[in-house]
Image (cartoon, coloured by chain):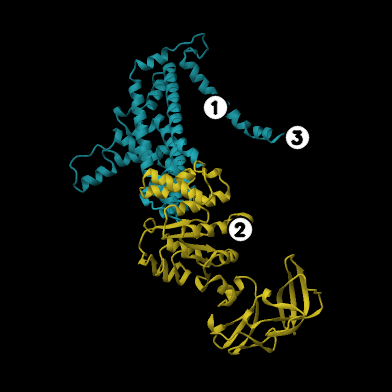
Chain colours: A yellow, B cyan
């Protein structure tokens, strides 16, 4: 049974279809991310789960029960808003206690629970502060504590780390993951930041133009993208157009020669081969690789931890490669590049 | 020589200061002098300083007139608040597309003179007015209803004229209200009513305060509406001052009554602002 389930849910705003036949299932205690560029429908999907938007079609189930017509205040869903939406006229304590007071919890219990959740988000002793006396990161924590304190079945987070500085953001990513583990609640996390989604999630759903493009673990999403959009949106990649002839052989148009690929579930036909820059190996000792090509180095950009290389293979194909700075390379120099068949993925057009 | 930004700001404000000095502070000072009997009937200063005109206040019918005016202004403010709040809420929160149109409709009455609008009300409420004629033509009444020249008609006229002054500041404070706060309250288990009481109402206190003052202050001193729509029992402090100055020519007593009115209004507003800002402090 899923804690949160959307079955064929659609939402239109006038001419625009914001959410297009989306079906996702979020298991209990899962950290589930909905990842996509702005305008892909991820926030609308979240708002449908929260009850702030009504879907035009489809079924929403919360805890196994249909919840389409349940008003937000009866859904038992916690939300951490993108712009926090902390009550400016209340103290930190009153903000966090708000939900408990709405549930008519006795004062002693309320106090205890608020103190506990302040501790959980590392804000001990700040209950008396006013909201405008807090830093951005502290406000974020209050938002999280306020959503958590009611112990809802699921917590929705709408890009809550967006407004924070990079350093605090990275710290908060780990914090969030820790908090989620500690309280053992289902988190649905909406973000456009692929790094965030990959580091925190158990499962990622990638959305584009209102549709779900792929659902899988971070590793599956990154290593085996199902569509060109997913391959391109998450990390960097090289696309080699061609035809998948039989399982295991892909004839690349720009190379004019066959490339060995993993013989997996793929249908045969027109498609692209996707190979990540860091999976391409460059240098001289490449023995044993499934695919090997002669190349000429066109461009080198030094990044400290790695070097970005543009290497030309044949007449038409330029590969982006992420190389170890220790490998001796120079512009105009001839070299060899290659990769193992397991590191590349073929996306056939029929699949999209 | 370069001037500091502060001096420049001072220079910019100076025409206003001069204007106010001539047309506000000077007349006010004259009224004050009259109220203490320091000016004689020939408009000359005289070496007198007396509280007799203030004492006269308490030995007259004036306190009753004051009470009536304050009550009327209070009723007007409450009625405007009850009518204006849902209206402002609707414009600011609910209707996204028709905002401009609705705001325009609120402001349109200002395009017609205040006096004309009050006369228009008279033609509607009069014994031979539109309502009475229509009702008797329909055979619903046999003799005309007395809709005018009573306190209810005055209240109606006051609410009608002052309602926009309540709606506009309320609208401004609601416009600033972050709508996601209401969603947050909802997600924390607050139904529409409790969201309103715990979030919307406290965060729109500044609008309630500003609107109430903009309605209450002119309503206390109002004299045209009671003059045109009211009967003898609608004699307000505005009418009293008008009569004392222009009919009875008792400038000294009229000035004392004016000063007491001003002091009373300042006192009431001071207390009210203190009450309003208690919650507001947290919201800023």
User: Where does residue A214 sit, x and y in percent of width and height?
Assistant: 52, 74
Mark 1, other Cα within 10 Å: few <14 / some 14–19 / many ≥20: few
Q: Is residue A17 above or below residue B168?
A: below
Specify whether B147 is left or right of A243. left
Displayed quadrant of residue A227:
bottom right
User: Where does residue A323 sit, x and y in percent of width and height?
Assistant: 73, 73
Would you say residue B108 is visible in this rendering?
A: no
Comes first in the chain, label 3 or label 1:
3
Q: Which of A83 and B277 lies nearest the eye of the viewer?
A: A83
State the CA–CA distance, disc 3 to disc 2.
Answer: 49 Å
The answer to the question of whether label 3 and label 1 lie on touching residues, with beta carbons closer than 8 A, is no
Mark 2, other Cα within 10 Å: few <14 / some 14–19 / many ≥20: some
Q: What chain letter is assigned to the residue under label 1?
A: B
Q: What chain letter is assigned to the residue under label 3?
A: B
Report the quarter where the N terminus of chain A lies: bottom left
Name the residue carrying label 2: A170
Would you say residue A23 is visible in this rendering?
A: yes
Q: Report the residue at 44% width, 52% height from top.
A: A149
Q: Which mark is residue B2?
A: 3
User: Where does residue B130 sit, x and y in percent of width and height?
Assistant: 28, 44
Report the quarter where the C terminus of chain A lies: bottom right
Q: What is the total number of numbered labels drawn onto the structure image?
A: 3
Do the residues at discs 3 and 1 belong to one chain? yes
Name the secondary structure under disc 3.
loop
Q: Which mark is residue B23?
A: 1
């Amino acid at each position: 049974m899923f804690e949160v389930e959307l079955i064929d849910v659609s939402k239109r705003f006038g001419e625009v279809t914001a959410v297009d036949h989306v079906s996702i299932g979020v298991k209990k205690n899962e950290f589930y991310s909905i990842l996509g560029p702005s305008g892909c429908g991820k926030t609308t999907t979240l708002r449908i789960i929260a009850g702030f938007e009504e879907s035009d079609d489809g079924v929403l189930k919360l805890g196994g029960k249909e919840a389409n017509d349940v008003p937000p205040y009866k859904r038992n869903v916690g939300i951490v808003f993108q712009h926090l939406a902390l009550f400016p006229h209340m103290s930190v304590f009153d903000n966090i206690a708000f939900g408990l007071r709405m549930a008519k919890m006795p004062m002693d219990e309320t106090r205890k629970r608020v103190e506990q959740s302040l501790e959980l988000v590392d804000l001990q002793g700040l209950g008396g502060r006013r909201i405008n006396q807090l830093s951005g990161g502290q406000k974020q924590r209050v938002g999280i504590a306020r959503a958590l304190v009611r112990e809802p079945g699921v917590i929705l987070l709408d890009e809550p780390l967006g407004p924070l500085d990079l350093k605090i953001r990275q710290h908060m990513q780990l914090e969030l993951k820790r908090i989620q583990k500690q309280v053992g609640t289902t988190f649905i996390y909406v973000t456009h930041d692929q790094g965030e989604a990959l580091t925190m999630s158990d499962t990622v759903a990638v959305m584009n133009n209102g549709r779900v493009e792929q659902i899988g673990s971070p590793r599956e999403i990154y290593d085996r993208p199902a569509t060109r959009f997913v391959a391109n949106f998450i990390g960097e990649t090289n696309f080699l157009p061609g035809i998948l002839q039989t399982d295991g052989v892909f004839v690349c148009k720009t190379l004019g020669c066959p490339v060995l690929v993993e013989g997996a579930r793929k249908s045969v036909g027109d498609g692209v081969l996707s190979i990540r820059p860091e999976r391409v190996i460059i240098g001289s000792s490449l023995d044993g690789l499934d695919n090997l090509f002669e190349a000429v180095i066109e461009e080198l950009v030094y990044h400290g931890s790695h070097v970005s290389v543009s290497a030309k293979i044949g007449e038409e194909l330029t590969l982006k490669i992420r190389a170890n700075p220790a490998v001796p390379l120079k512009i105009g120099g001839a070299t060899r590049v290659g990769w193992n068949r397991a590191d590349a993925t073929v996306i056939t057009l029929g699949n999209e | 020589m370069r001037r500091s930004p502060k001096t420049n700001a001072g220079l910019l404000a100076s025409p206003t200061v001069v204007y106010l000095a001539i047309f506000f502070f000077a007349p006010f000072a004259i009224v004050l002098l009259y109220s203490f009997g320091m000016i004689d009937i020939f408009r000359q200063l005289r070496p007198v300083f007396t509280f007799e005109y203030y004492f006269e206040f308490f030995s007259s019918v004036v306190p009753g007139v004051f009470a009536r005016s304050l009550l009327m202004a209070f009723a007007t403010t409450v009625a405007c608040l009850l009518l204006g709040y849902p209206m402002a809420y609707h414009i600011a929160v609910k209707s996204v597309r028709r905002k401009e149109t609705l705001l325009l409709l609120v402001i349109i009455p200002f395009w017609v003179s205040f006096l004309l609008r009050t006369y228009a009300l008279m033609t509607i409420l009069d014994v031979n007015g539109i309502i009475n004629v229509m009702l008797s033509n329909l055979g619903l009444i046999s003799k005309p209803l007395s809709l005018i020249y009573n306190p209810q008609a005055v209240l109606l006229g006051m609410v009608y004229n002052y309602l926009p002054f309540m709606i506009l500041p309320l609208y401004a404070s609601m416009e600033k209200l972050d709508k996601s706060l209401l969603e947050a309250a909802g997600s924390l288990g607050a139904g529409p009513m409790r969201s309103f009481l715990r979030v919307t109402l406290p965060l729109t206190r500044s609008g309630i305060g500003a609107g109430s003052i903009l309605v209450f202050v002119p309503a206390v001193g109002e004299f045209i509406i009671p003059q045109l729509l009211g009967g003898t029992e609608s004699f307000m402090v505005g009418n009293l001052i008008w009569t004392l100055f222009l009919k009875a020519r008792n400038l000294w007593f009229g000035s004392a009554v004016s000063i007491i009115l001003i002091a009373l209004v300042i006192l009431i507003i001071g207390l009210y602002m203190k009450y309003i800002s208690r919650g507001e402090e947290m919201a800023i």
